Image (tube, grey):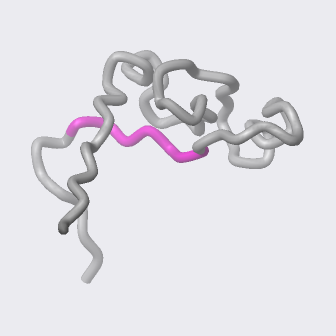
Amino acid sequence: MEKIIEIPNIFSATKDYVDKWVSLSEDYKKVIASGETLSEVLKKTPPGGRAVVFKVLPNLNYAPSQI
């Protein structure tokens, strides 16, 4: 049996953090920390907890790629 995984809608949680690094709760609903660099966000994120960390990209209406 296939397992269907839903992609969480993170827009509402991250719309104010475009071009910044963020740390989200495991359910993707709450911003735990934000900053200009990954290092800054990791320092602000409480140790021992589970979090999702990524950089929020602007909505470019296309997928960025490398050549």
Question: What is the magenta range?
Answer: 53-59
* Residue under the point 57% across and 35% down: 26
| Quarter-of-image position of residue 35 | top right
The N terminus is located in which quarter?
A: bottom left
**Residue 16 to residue 66: above or below:** above
**Residue 13 to residue 57: above or below:** above
* Residue under the point 78% across and 37% down: 49
| 22 sits left or right of 15 in the view | right
The C terminus is located in which quarter?
A: bottom left
| 64 sits left or right of 18 in the view | left
Q: Residue 21, percent across and down?
A: 59, 39
Q: Residue 9, percent across and down?
A: 29, 30
| Quarter-of-image position of residue 16 | top left
- 3 and 44: which is toward the camera: 3
User: Magenta segment: does it hold 18?
Assistant: no
**Residue 33 to residue 23: above or below:** above
Residue reaching furthest to the front: 1
**Residue 35 to residue 62: above or below:** above
| Quarter-of-image position of residue 11 | top left
Residue reaching furthest to the bottom: 67
Count of all numbered marks drawn on residues in the image: 0
Q: Residue 13, percent across and down?
A: 43, 19
Q: Residue 5, percent across and down?
A: 27, 51
User: Magenta segment: does it hold 56?
Assistant: yes
